[in-house]
Image (cartoon, rainbow, N blue to C red):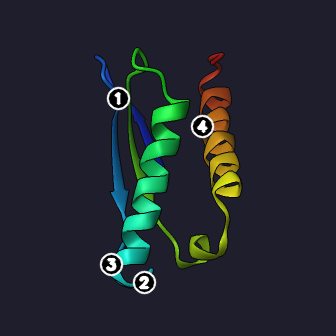
């Protein structure tokens, strides 16, 4: 996942899922899950550009595990920036 702060809201979110991940059904499922996690975790007033790169191993993870990892990455980013969420 790549994160970059920007100057004005709203946050933007992009998902990359190549054919290496799987067929279109599997890729679209991962994209839907990633967008939903982003929608739940990132508030509208935050100013972030996030690019989420899907991996084949994510196909075998459940939604809660992916959500936890996403949350950990965002928390680590804010900790690195020394900001409180």
Location of residue 22 by image quarter: bottom left
Say which residue appears at 37% left-offset and 67% top-offset. Answer: 28
Is 65 or 80 nearer to us in this picture? 65
Residue bearing mark 1: 11
Q: Position of residue 39 (x, y in %)?
A: 45, 35
Q: Earlier in the sequence, mark 2 or mark 4?
A: 2
Say which residue appears at 63% left-offset and 48% top-offset. Answer: 67
Tell how many labels: 4
In contact (CB < 8 Å): disc 2 and disc 4:
no
Q: Position of residue 7 (x, y in %)?
A: 30, 18
Query: How crowded is the residue under tag 4: few (<14 C-alpha within 10 Å), some, or many (20+)?
Result: some
Say which residue appears at 65% left-offset and 40% top-offset. Answer: 71
Q: Earlier in the sequence, mark 1 or mark 4?
A: 1
6 in relation to 58, above or below? above
Nearer the camera: disc 4 or disc 3: 3
Residue bearing mark 4: 74
Residue bearing mark 2: 22
Nearer the camera: disc 2 or disc 1: 2
Residue bearing mark 3: 24
Instruction: Determine the CA span between mark 1 and mark 3.
Output: 26 Å
């Amino acid at each position: 996942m790549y994160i970059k702060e920007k100057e004005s809201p709203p946050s933007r979110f992009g998902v990359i899922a190549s054919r290496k991940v799987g067929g279109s059904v599997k890729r679209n499922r991962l994209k839907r899950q990633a967008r939903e996690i982003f929608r739940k975790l990132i508030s509208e007033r935050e100013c972030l550009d996030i690019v989420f790169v899907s991996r084949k191993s994510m196909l075998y993870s459940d939604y809660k595990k992916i959500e936890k990892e996403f949350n950990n990455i965002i928390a680590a980013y804010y900790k690195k920036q020394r900001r409180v969420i």
